[in-house]
Amino acid sequence: MPFVDNRKIGDVILDLKNISLSFGGVKALTDISFNVREHEIRAIIGPNGAGKSSMLNVINGVYRPQQGEITYRGQVRRDMNTYAAAKSGIARTFQNIALFKGMSVLDNIMTGRNLKMQTNFLLQALYWGPAQKEEIAHRKKVEEIIDFLEIQHIRKTPVSRLPYGLQKRVELGRALAAEPEILLLDEPMAGMNVEEKQDMCRFILDVNDQFGATIVLIEHDMGVVMDISDRVVVLDYGKKIGDGTPDEVRSNQDVINAYLGVAH
Ligand SMILES: Nc1ncnc2c1ncn2[C@@H]1O[C@H](COP(=O)(O)OP(=O)(O)OP(=O)(O)O)[C@@H](O)[C@H]1O
């Protein structure tokens, strides 16, 4: 496993057992089990429609599986919703960028601090006492993220004016602003050119290393997945067909068949 020793991959932080999810007659996920270790980069791959996004949506409480059990930090999660997931330290980015396009980079990243804000709306509206202090602390954190992502030069620019690759970076910034324990990235490199992909890879590795975040990512670019992931889980038609290190997954015949489109 790459980097395991120096990156101190820890115990299982998220454990998914026998997860099944259907939409009417469509079985999006069938009896899927896998775990995520603290501090690792865990990829979910598979052909189109394999169930990858559904899996992320189960992890962050968008979908509630009909069967199965999720244990997060040693506690079985029941009735998880997106707010509870976010509050418990799970942040995510989306396949299609979900930013406030008219707002500046700075303000978009600031929205990621919402869950961390303590003072009530009245104090905030008056911008008084504790609210002022808190605002300054949040701004400091956001500026740290802006520096880290090397986007100082566009901090005041409305997001809609930015090229796609930079918008993706801002979305990562907003997720980071929540100081997540687990960061879910849904196709972080989709639509990027080679240079943008290299930058994003570097940021993901640095987020993992410097912020200590555990990362679960969906990605179609196999080169990227195999380069940066510690372990990879492979889905096909809603079932798990492979799970292991990049090398193990690469040589798994079921995985090779799925990617070559061999008939079931
Ligand atoms: N909200 C939904 N309602 C109905 N069916 C859904 C819904 N979400 C996903 N599905 C179905 O579940 C299956 C898995 O979809 P999912 O989007 O999770 O796959 P994916 O691996 O992320 O695909 P892609 O790589 O194309 O994004 C597909 O058959 C899809 O049509």
Image: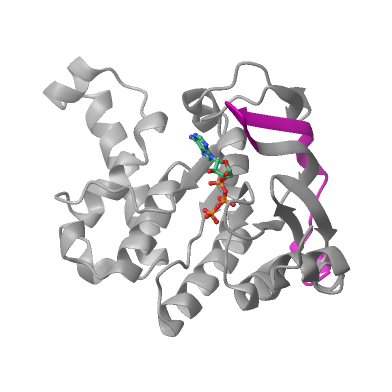
Q: Quadrant of the N terminus?
A: bottom right
Q: Residue at x 28, y 25 (%)?
A: 130
Q: Is residue 33 rendered magenta in the image?
A: no
Q: Position of residue 89 (x, y in %)?
A: 56, 35
Q: Nearer the viewer, residue 30 or 40?
A: 30
| Whole-percent x, y for residue 201 in the image | 54, 72
> Please, which colouring scheme is shown?
one colour
Left or right of 5, for residue 164: left
Q: In the image, is residue 119 above or below residue 196?
A: above
Figure check: 172 above or below 238: below
- The residue at 73%/29% (across/down) is 70
Residue 60 seen: yes
- Name the spot of residue 178 as percent of width and height, x first: 45, 41
Q: Quadrant of the C terminus?
A: bottom right
Measured as percent of width and height from the top left, residue 96 is found at 37, 53
Q: In screen coordinates, is 193 left or right of 10? A: left
Residue pushed farthest bottom?
A: 195
Q: Residue furthest front?
A: 263
Q: How many marks?
A: 0
Quarter holding ligand 1: top right
Q: Which residues are magenta?
A: 1-27
Q: Residue at x 82, y 65 (%)?
A: 245
Q: Is residue 23 magenta?
A: yes
- What residue is rendered at 49% in x and 45% in y? 92
Res 118 → quadrant: top left
Q: Is residue 9 left or right of residue 109?
A: right
Residue 156 in view in this figure: no
